[in-house]
Image: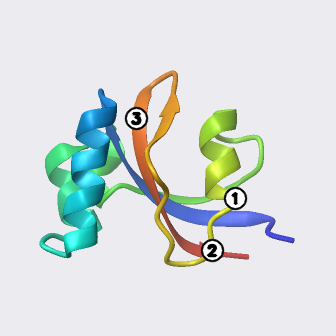
Amino acid sequence: MVREVHACHILVKTLEEAQAILNELNLGKKSFARLAGEKSLCSSGRKGGDLGWFTRGRMVREFESIAFSLKKGEMSAPVRTQFGWHVIKVLENR
């Protein structure tokens, strides 16, 4: 069972923005870290969207549910929380 996740994310205001970012990532034109730096509304964007390691109970429920369901290297579809829309990428699980 996964106890901790190391993830990064890109936070934007709209579903359309999140979907456009996901499309760019899937085309491989820019790295996740670069897009996070350019587009994310979260201060983590300055670190390529890196949120570091976290355990359950540290993030909002919607975000956490998806982050803990992804395998290493996987990206989420757009996820809505009270903060906006996220694209999440899991870097490692332990």
Badge 2 amino acid: Lys
The image shows residue 55 at horizontal and vertical percentages of 74, 54
Instruction: Please report the residue visible at 73 percent of the width from the left and 76 percent of the height from the top.
Output: 94
Badge 3 amino acid: Trp
On screen, residue 8 versus residue 16, left or right, reads right
Q: Which residue is mark 1?
A: 68
Q: CA distance from mark 2 to mark 1?
A: 8 Å
Q: Which residue is mark 2?
A: 71
On screen, residue 41 versus residue 29, left or right, reads right
Local secondary structure at mark 1: loop
Instruction: Please report the residue visible at 69 percent of the width from the left and 61 percent of the height from the top.
Output: 69
What colour scheme does the image use?
A: rainbow
- Tell me, yes or no, whether the two marked residues, 2 and 3, touch with CB atoms within 8 Å: no
Q: Earlier in the sequence, mark 1 or mark 3?
A: 1
Q: Residue furthest top?
A: 82
Which residue is at the front of the view, 26 or 73?
Answer: 26
Q: Is residue 49 above or below residue 59?
A: below
The image shows residue 7 at horizontal and vertical percentages of 52, 62
Label 3 neighbourhood size at 10 Å, few (<14), some (14-19), many (20+)? many
On screen, residue 38 versus residue 58, left or right, reads left
Instruction: Please report the residue visible at 49 percent of the width from the left and 32 percent of the height from the top.
Output: 80
Q: Is residue 89 above or below residue 72?
A: above
Local secondary structure at mark 3: strand
**Mark sitting on residue 85:** 3
On screen, residue 46 versus residue 70, left or right, reads left
Local secondary structure at mark 2: loop
Instruction: Please report the residue visible at 57 percent of the width from the left and 78 percent of the height from the top.
Output: 72
Label 1 neighbourhood size at 10 Å, few (<14), some (14-19), many (20+)? many
Number of numbered labels in the structure image: 3
Which residue is at the front of the view, 55 or 78?
Answer: 78
Q: Is residue 46 visible?
A: no
